Image (cartoon, rainbow, N blue to C red):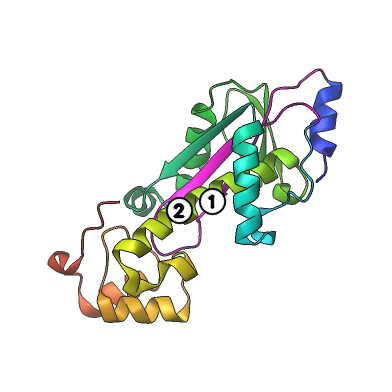
């Protein structure tokens, strides 16, 4: 994993660098989750890359290593009701900001995957940053494993939806299961095809089951 962006900052005397990434913009259910990670200077972890390019076993391995070796890890979670209220783009920015604010150490600079945030700290937005910056790659792993754990918890309570396999994304099987079993309270009601199903059948609040997650 490249240190190109980190190295540029090191040369400027900046060493406390937070990488920020998110996961969960596309699913039909659950929160968007962001992570902020501050790694030691010149940190290396062989094989670490964008979490989407890693299998689950590797992601879990890197998650444990990063949690153990990072200087600081912050998590930001924005639930489905807020996503419906303000839209997924703004909810993603909110989750990222929460992740940064939850760090135990204040970063001198923030490297962000794709998004631009209004921060008091200086920052750099990097397209495909999770493939170009080790700090962002680390954040992508933390965010992915964190959100997946929420989906596994949901799957234990409602196995009929198949959350353990599709993680809430709009697969054919997932949509069929929604039509068969109905809505849970942490679905994103403004997202298609959820909004289409609601408009077609009329949303009956009594039929929206509580998840308590």
Q: Residue at image x 40%, y 72%?
A: 162
Q: Residue at image x 73%, y 51%?
A: 49
Check disc 1 and report the residue beneath it: 145
Q: Is residue 115 shown left or right of residue 96? A: right
Mark 1 crowdedness (10 Å alpha carbons): few <14, some 14-19, many ≥20: some
Q: Is residue 72 shown left or right of residue 11? A: left
Cα distance between the residues tagged 2 and 1: 6 Å
Q: Residue at image x 55%, y 52%?
A: 144
Q: Residue at image x 34%, y 50%?
A: 85
Give the magenta range: 13-42
Q: Looking at the image, which is closer to me, 69 or 107?
A: 69
Q: Looking at the image, which is closer to me, 71 or 199?
A: 71
The residue at the far left in this view is: 206
Above/below status of 88 relative to 66: below
Mark 2 crowdedness (10 Å alpha carbons): few <14, some 14-19, many ≥20: few
Q: Residue 190, how many percent across, how many down?
A: 35, 62
Q: Residue 184, how many percent across, how many down?
A: 27, 64
Q: Which mark is residue 32?
A: none
Q: Is residue 164 shown left or right of residue 142? A: left
Q: Are marks 2 and 1 in contact (CB under 8 Å)?
A: yes
Q: Which mark is residue 149?
A: 2
User: Do we see residue 8 in this rendering?
Assistant: yes
Q: Residue 18, how many percent across, how many down?
A: 65, 31
Secondary structure of the residue carrying tag 2 is: helix
In the figure, residue 10 lies in which quadrant?
top right
Residue 22: within the magenta? yes
Residue 65: within the magenta? no
User: Do we see residue 188 in this rendering?
Assistant: no
């Amino acid at each position: 994993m490249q240190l190109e962006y980190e190295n540029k900052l090191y040369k400027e005397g900046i060493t406390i660098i937070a990488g920020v990434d998110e996961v969960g913009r596309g699913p039909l259910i659950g929160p968007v989750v962001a992570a902020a990670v501050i790694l030691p200077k010149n940190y290396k972890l062989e094989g670490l890359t964008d979490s989407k390019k890693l299998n689950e076993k590797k992601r879990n391995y890197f998650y444990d290593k990063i949690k153990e070796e990072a200087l600081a890890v912050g998590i930001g979670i924005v639930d489905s009701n807020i996503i419906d209220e303000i839209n997924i783009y703004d909810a993603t920015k909110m989750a990222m900001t929460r992740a940064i604010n939850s760090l135990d150490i204040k970063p001198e600079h923030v490297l962000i995957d794709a998004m631009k945030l209004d921060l008091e700290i200086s920052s750099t937005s990097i397209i495909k940053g999770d493939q170009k910056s080790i700090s962002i790659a680390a954040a992508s792993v933390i965010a992915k494993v964190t959100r997946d754990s929420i989906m596994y918890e949901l799957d234990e309570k409602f196995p009929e939806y198949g959350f353990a396999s599709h993680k809430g994304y709009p697969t054919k099987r997932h949509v069929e299961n929604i039509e068969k079993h109905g809505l849970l309270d942490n679905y994103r009601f403004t997202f298609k095809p959820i909004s289409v199903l609601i408009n077609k059948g009329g949303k009956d609040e009594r039929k929206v089951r509580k998840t308590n997650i």
